[in-house]
Image (tube, rainbow, N blue to C red):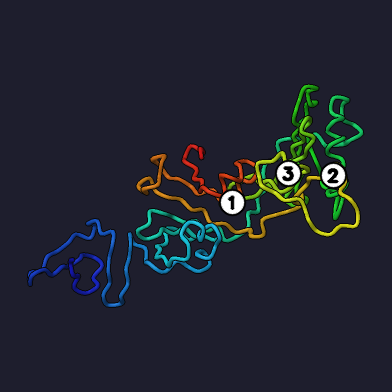
């Protein structure tokens, strides 16, 4: 160790074996220990315990558990706090405000059941019970589809529900002709990036997410079209904030050789089988491959 005499910032004066040595101010000093105030500085950033606001987030606890961790601030901004964990080859970006942006709307033909082409009437048959049951209250949800008529041979129809305040895509709706099923995904922001997550289906037998039809007491039988239905088309993840967890290429578990980003399982509902989500953590490389 090199002991610094005083707290002179211009030029570091070191004492070793009774001899005073000088160290240029520009010399690389990644770690500095100030013994007068007992403060450790890492690359010009003061170390401190990771704030409970970040450490208590479910995604952070899933990767690191309840361990106490030291972190240095990389960048502090109005909407984001970016920290690096000491000795773990991980960085955390805490987005502490909700994402005000809408997801881009890529289709612009309004869904009007009575105006669809004859080749699209199967969409009305399968989707109208869902729309009339869930999307008319508390307000009618604007729904759009591709400008071009759905081909007669199409097996899947794609529709989107538009957010009433933000506009832009809020719900993604997939109608399957031969499976006789409707899947609805919530489009959600995580770290200022949008993901789709399955939140409702008319038939749990046809989804990649493990979902359970309601077992609550009921006064009438299930409607035939929703006998195996589960979830709710207006379900949403309750926390608008998010923590993006990345790990360096040097991390022992890194497979891509670049920075990898942890993708929480809720962002992969209906995309990756639940059997894999229950047993694996998924990391996305810089090329967006899992």
> Can see residue 168?
no
Which is nearer the eye, 187 or 65? 65
Q: Residue at x 74, y 47 (%)?
A: 200
Residue 131 disc label: 2
| Left or right: 116, with 6 as reference point | right
Q: CA distance from mark 2 to mark 1?
A: 27 Å
Residue 190 disc label: 1
Q: Residue at x 85, y 24 (%)?
A: 119
Q: CA distance from mark 3 to mark 2?
A: 18 Å
Check disc 2: other Cα within 10 Å, few if <14, some if 14-19, many if 20+: some
**Callout 1 secondary element:** strand
Vertical comparison of 122 with 62: above or below: above
Residue placed under numbered mark 3 in the picture: 204
Q: x, y (%) of residue 265? A: 58, 49
Vertical comparison of 39 with 252: above or below: below
Q: Residue at x 90, y 57 (%)?
A: 219
Q: Residue at x 74, y 34 (%)?
A: 158
- Looking at marks 3 and 2 on the same chain, the residue that comes earlier in the sequence is marked by 2
**Callout 3 secondary element:** helix
Q: Quadrant of the N terminus?
A: bottom left
Q: Residue furthest bottom?
A: 36
Q: Quadrant of residue 2?
A: bottom left
Which is closer to the viewer, label 3 or label 2? 3
| Left or right: 181, with 32 as reference point | right
């Amino acid at each position: 160790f090199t002991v610094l005499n005083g707290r002179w910032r211009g030029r570091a004066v070191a004492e070793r074996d009774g001899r005073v040595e000088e160290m240029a101010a520009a010399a690389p000093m990644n770690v500095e220990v100030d013994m007068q105030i007992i403060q450790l500085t890492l690359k010009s950033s003061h170390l401190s315990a990771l704030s409970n606001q970040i450490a208590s987030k479910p995604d952070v606890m899933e990767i690191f558990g309840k361990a106490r961790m030291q972190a240095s601030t990389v960048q502090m901004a109005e909407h984001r706090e970016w920290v690096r964990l000491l000795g773990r080859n991980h960085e955390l970006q805490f987005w502490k405000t909700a994402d005000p942006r809408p997801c881009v709307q890529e289709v612009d033909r309004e869904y009007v059941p009575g105006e669809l082409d004859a080749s699209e009437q199967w969409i009305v048959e399968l989707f109208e019970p869902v729309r009339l049951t869930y999307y008319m209250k508390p307000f009618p949800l604007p729904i759009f589809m591709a400008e071009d008529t759905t081909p007669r041979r199409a097996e899947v129809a794609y529709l989107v529900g538009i957010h009433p305040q933000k506009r832009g895509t809020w719900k993604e709706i997939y109608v399957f002709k031969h499976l006789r099923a409707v899947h609805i995904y919530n489009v959600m922001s995580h770290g200022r990036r949008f993901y789709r997550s399955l939140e409702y289906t008319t038939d749990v037998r046809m989804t990649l997410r493990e979902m359970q039809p309601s077992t609550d007491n009921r006064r009438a039988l299930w409607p035939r079209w929703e006998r195996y239905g589960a979830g709710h088309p207006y379900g949403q993840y309750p926390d608008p904030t998010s923590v993006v967890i990345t790990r360096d290429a040097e991390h022992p578990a890194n497979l891509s050789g670049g920075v990898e980003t942890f993708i929480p399982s809720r962002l992969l509902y209906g995309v990756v089988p639940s059997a894999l989500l229950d047993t694996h953590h998924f990391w996305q490389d810089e090329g967006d491959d899992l």
